[in-house]
């Protein structure tokens, strides 16, 4: 069994990173150790051979490539930050960011499903679940046998999380909760368009009178009576290869053993996961940006106008140069935060928000320049950039809207007073 | 049975290669390097032999500067057990030549008591395609080159190999110990999974100086590269408007009929 084999082999990841830093004094934050470099090489090769060729079709048909997703499981990428004893690879935030960046350069939609599953669902259970829950839930999630995400937003509630209406009423003896409500915009909420996804971390109130409504984190599983697929959300602008759904919960009985953390303690669980979630989205944007830059740079050398390659025109040079500088600035920001992120700690939200806020807008802008550079060809699916542009837009909305980041960051900065 | 897999770090196949201004060789500065594709296929075949319990231990060996260890690490991540790095500062695309490589590998094969050597048919930088053949000769072992399929007998003492030649495919049977060189269609190399990349961290890589294995003068190139040039640019084709015109061009311009 996968978890047994891995348990024999891997020790905690940190020491090797420290050695690399100590021996030369310099660290390449993008690939801090040879293992990170090897991982990036492997994922890049996988993207070139297996992800790139299917991206346009799955985007066009708005369907989820479940076989390819499961291959990510075979490669050990789904459980990338998970302790080997639960079936994961035990790597750090940098590894998670690196894999996300590489996958997103090929298919941001597939990457959205990957990040949802690996960072939003798996990492949250890992940080907040108890031993029994981790042993029970993580191995199958790490192999990709079970695929899922989280249920937070509702049809009428997004940023205003505490305004949610889903209610999980405790039974008289407290041994189970009865859940009623509807969740919306759930990535991996369905996999085939016909039935629900396998496994979700769901947020619901347990006691309207209590602080935060007694917001609690529950594990909900496919097949629980009353848990159904409301509808697959179709005709999305971007991230079309990532399935999104509305999920319905009607008197779903959830056993106490499926409560993650404390009853009423969901806000704490959420806080612990936010950094890596936002870094993950920022990493997706890095992939989008990089691919856009590569495509426009190559096109500019090949396309001729007025007797010379358009790469010799100043406006094209400006597009390419500014895009690269912005990408590297964002990349450095993201990887610097990842390098210093202790996944176990209750981190400061400021830079998680900051990296995502910056990269969402930046990747959209870079993809837009790429379309402009490619002209008519940029407007057509085969040339990738219009898809990257469409995929980038939602990153200003999900995982925290731009406006939510503005609010959080301004508040944090006011508290800090000064910047070191 | 111990299997030795010699591998080489070469310029990545996708790189647009440039010649140095003094024409002494190809520009290797800041150029992306990768594991030679045929070597990757050889590693994959060796790993499959281990999975089938025909091979008991896999050893990868690579000759070159310190960076050659990158290729060894990839081999370890794919499932090879240990690596040997033979260090030299000679340019591996033109100064370190096939006979020297074969002599070095002969020493390693004997030292490791290998019963099978599986290597790529050629490297994509020098494209000599000679090492496997020379190595077999030095070791006085049978060789099968351009393998597209390898099947071991139940007693693991002999193997049947399909080999690709210009005239078609032929089937050859040899006994171990033997040298096999891998061709393109032998297999599809696996991706090193993340758990295996992590496992590779603990696998040993031993470094040896090239001149500790063979005489320093045997390492020196026997052929001197005088000049390296880019191939002549392809001329644009010509569109003709009639068959007569075509025949005339083929006869008088291209001079092929």
Image: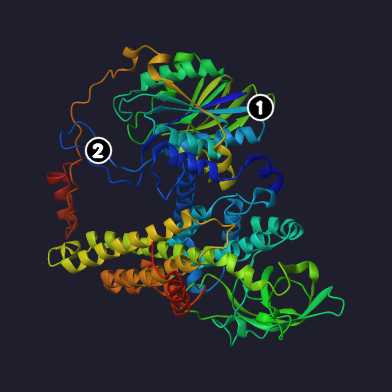
Q: Which of A113 and B6 is in front in this view?
A: A113
Q: Position of residue B143 (x, y in %)?
A: 50, 22
Q: Where is residue B1 in the image (x, y as percent from the top left)?
A: 62, 23
Q: Position of residue A279 (x, y in %)?
A: 48, 63
Bin the neighbour count of mark 1 within 10 Å (Cα to Cα): few under 14, some 14-19, many 20 and up.
Answer: few
Question: In this view of the protein, can residue A154 be seen by the observer?
Answer: no
Identity of the residue furthest to the front in this view? A417
Q: Nearer the viewer, mark 1 or mark 2?
A: 2
Question: What residue is drawn where x is 58% and y is 35%?
Answer: B47
> If the image is split into quadrants, where does the C terminus of chain A sit?
bottom left
Quarter of the image for residue A392 reads: bottom left
In this picture, is A83 found above or below A285? above
Output the chain of dot 2: B
In this picture, is B250 found above or below A213? above
* SS under mark 2: loop
Residue denoted by label 2: B27
Q: Which of marks 1 and 2 is nearer the N terminus?
A: 2
In this picture, is A15 found above or below A112? above
Bin the neighbour count of mark 2 within 10 Å (Cα to Cα): few under 14, some 14-19, many 20 and up.
Answer: some
Question: What residue is drawn where x is 25% and y is 67%?
Answer: A319
Q: Are marks 1 and 2 on the same chain?
A: yes
Residue denoted by label 1: B153
Question: What residue is drawn where x is 41% and y is 62%?
Answer: A286
In this picture, is A70 found above or below A10? below
Report if the CB atoms under discs 1 and 2 are less than 8 Å apart.
no
Q: Where is residue B103 in the image (x, y as percent from the top left)?
A: 41, 16
Disc 1 to disc 2, C-alpha distance: 46 Å
């Amino acid at each position: 069994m996968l978890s047994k084999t891995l348990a024999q082999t891997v020790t905690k990841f940190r020491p090797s990173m420290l050695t690399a830093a100590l021996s030369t004094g310099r660290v390449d934050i993008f690939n801090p150790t040879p293992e990170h470099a090897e991982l990036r090489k492997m994922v890049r090769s996988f993207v070139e051979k297996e992800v790139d060729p299917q991206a346009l079709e799955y985007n066009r048909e708005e369907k989820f490539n479940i076989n390819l997703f499961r291959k990510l499981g075979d490669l050990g990428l789904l459980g990338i930050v998970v302790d080997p004893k639960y079936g994961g690879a035990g790597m750090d935030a940098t590894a998670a960011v690196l894999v996300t960046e590489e996958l997103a350069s090929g298919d941001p939609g597939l990457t959205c499903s990957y990040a949802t599953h690996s960072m939003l669902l798996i990492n949250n259970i890992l940080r907040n679940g108890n031993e029994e829950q981790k042993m029970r839930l993580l191995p199958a999630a790490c192999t990709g046998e079970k695929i899922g995400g989280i249920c937070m937003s509702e049809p009428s509630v997004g940023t205003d999380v505490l305004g949610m209406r889903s209610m999980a009423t405790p039974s008289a003896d407290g041994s189970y909760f009865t859940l009623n409500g509807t969740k919306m915009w759930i990535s991996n909420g369905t996999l085939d368009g016909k039935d629900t996804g396998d496994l979700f971390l769901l947020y619901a109130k347990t006691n309207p009178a209590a602080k935060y409504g007694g917001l609690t984190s529950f594990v909900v599983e496919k097949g629980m009576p009353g848990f159904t697929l409301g509808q697959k959300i179709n005709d999305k602008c971007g991230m079309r290869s990532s399935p999104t759904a509305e999920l319905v919960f009607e008197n779903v009985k959830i056993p106490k053993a499926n409560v993650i953390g404390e009853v009423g303690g969901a806000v704490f669980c959420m806080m612990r996961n936010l950094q890596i979630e936002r870094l993950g989205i920022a990493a997706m944007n890095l992939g989008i940006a990089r691919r856009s830059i590569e495509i426009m740079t190559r096109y500019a050398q090949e396309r001729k106008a007025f007797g010379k390659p358009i790469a010799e025109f100043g406006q094209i040079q400006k597009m390419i140069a500014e895009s690269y500088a912005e990408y590297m600035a964002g990349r450095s920001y993201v990887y610097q935060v990842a390098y210093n992120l202790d996944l176990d700690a209750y981190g400061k939200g400021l830079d998680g928000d900051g990296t995502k806020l910056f990269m969402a807008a930046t990747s959209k802008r870079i993809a837009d320049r790429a379309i402009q550079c490619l002209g008519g060809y940029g407007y057509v699916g085969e040339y990738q950039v219009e898809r990257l542009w469409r995929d980038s837009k939602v990153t200003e909305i999900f995982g925290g809207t731009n406006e939510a980041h503005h609010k959080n960051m301004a508040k944090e900065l006011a508290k800090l007073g000064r910047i070191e | 049975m111990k299997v030795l897999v010699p591998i080489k770090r070469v310029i990545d196949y996708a790189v647009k290669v440039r010649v140095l201004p003094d024409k002494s060789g190809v520009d290797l500065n800041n150029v992306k390097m990768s594991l030679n594709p045929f070597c990757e296929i050889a590693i994959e075949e060796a790993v499959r032999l281990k999975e089938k319990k025909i091979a008991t231990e896999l050893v990868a060996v690579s000759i070159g500067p310190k960076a050659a260890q990158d290729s060894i690490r990839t081999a370890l991540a794919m499932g090879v057990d240990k690596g040997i790095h033979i260090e030299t500062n000679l340019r591996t695309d033109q100064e370190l030549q096939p006979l020297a490589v074969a002599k070095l590998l002969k020493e390693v094969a004997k030292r490791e008591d290998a019963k099978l050597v599986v290597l790529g048919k050629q490297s994509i930088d020098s494209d000599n395609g000679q090492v496997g053949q020379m190595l077999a000769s030095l070791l006085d072992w049978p060789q099968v080159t351009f393998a597209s399929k390898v099947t071991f007998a139940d007693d693991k003492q002999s193997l049947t190999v399909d080999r690709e030649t210009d005239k078609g495919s032929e089937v050859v049977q040899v006994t171990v110990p033997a040298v096999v060189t891998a061709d393109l269609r032998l297999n599809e190399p696996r991706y090193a999974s993340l758990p295996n990349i992590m496992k590779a961290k603990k696998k040993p890589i031993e470094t040896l100086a090239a001149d500790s294995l063979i005489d320093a003068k045997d390492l020196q190139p026997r052929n001197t590269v005088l000049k390296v040039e880019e191939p002549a640019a392809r001329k644009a084709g010509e569109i003709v408007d009639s068959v007569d015109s075509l025949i005339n061009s083929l006869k008088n311009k291209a001079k092929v009929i």
